[in-house]
Amino acid sequence: MTLTDLIEIVIAVALVIGAVFTLIGSVGLMKLDTAMKRMHAPTKAATLGIGALLMASMIHSFAFGSGSLKEVLIMAFLFVTAPISANFIAKVAIHRGQDVPPPSPPNDQTWSTLNPLDEAIDDPELPTRS
Amino acid sequence: MIAPDRLYDLALVFAFCAVSLAQLLAMVRLVIGPDVTDRILALDTMVVDAIGLIVLLGIAQGTEIYFEAALIFAMLGFVSTVAYARFILRGDIIE
């Protein structure tokens, strides 16, 4: 077994791991039953899968091309932004009444969505500006 | 790409099939999604899977020229997800 064979096996393993995790993310998106549960699968598993695919691409470019670390840029961007977008989608789910309502905020403060206790349950169709 | 002259060609074919299937499942969720929350989430997943397909195409063809496309997909996907979420949350995107 030469070094090239070893590198190709590493690339193949990274590709399979990435593909399986990406597929698991979408299967979870289809299969789970509530909106809050559905949020788990794509935001974590699919992000990890894309990370493995980018790792395979990086190993490939180092082994057979000129070699580049540019994929780290995409990886870092995805890993930083995935929790942020998941947080925003979770806020939307709370706002639309897809989850148990949040507890009352202390004192005179309000939650950062529009009145999640009243409007989301009364009017699930359109968001209205208070 | 049919004749496996490299060891990872089979893994590449498997990865193309799996990521394409993931893309299709996310699209089904985008169509049937009972609420707008699921549609935003499905769109976010589709963007991430599209980045995966672009990266796989780059590996299959042995080129680096698709890197910029993948990076722009990542940035536009994040911005569009946040814009949709803010529009639902606040009724406006830039207040």
Image (spheres, grey):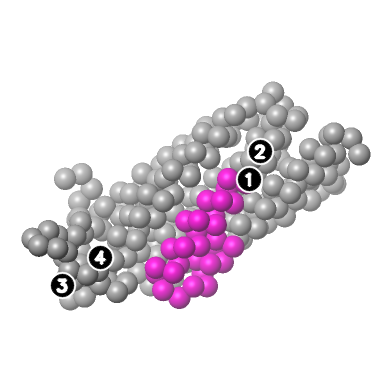
Horizontal relation, residue A69 to residue B38: left or right? right
Q: Residue furthest top?
A: A66
Query: In 3D space, how far apart are the residues under numbered discs 4 and 3 (Cα atoms)?
Result: 10 Å
Q: Chain of mark 4?
A: A
Q: Earlier in the sequence, mark 4 or mark 1?
A: 1
- Which residue was labeled with disc 3? A118
- Whether residues under marks 1 and 2 lie with C-beta atoms below 8 angstroms apart, the answer is yes
What is the number of callouts on the image?
4
Which amino acid lies under the numbered mark 1 shown in the image of this protein?
Answer: Leu
Q: Amino acid at mark 3?
A: Asp
- For disc 3, the neighbor class at 10 Å (few under 14, some 14 to 19, many from 20) is few
* Lower sequence index among marks 1 and 3: 1
Q: Chain of mark 1?
A: A
Mark 1 and mark 3: Cα distance apart in space: 44 Å
Q: Magenta: predominant secondary structure element? A: helix
Amino acid type of the residue tagged 4 in the rendering: His
Indicate the secondary structure of the residue bearing disc 4. helix
Residue A14 vertical placement versus A67 (above, below): below
Image vertical order of residue B69 relative to residue A18, above or below? above
Q: Check the image and name the residue furthest to the right.
A: A1
**Residue B74 visible (yes or no):** no
In the rendered image, which quarter contains the C terminus of chain A? bottom left
Which comes before the other along the chain, label 4 or label 3?
4
Task: Name which residue type carries label 2.
Answer: Ser
Q: Position of residue A61 (x, y in %)?
A: 69, 31
- Where is residue A102? Give x, y as percent: 24, 69
Which residue is identified by label 2? Answer: A57
Residue A53's disc is 1
Nearer-N-terminus badge (4/2)? 2
- What's the magenta region? A24-53
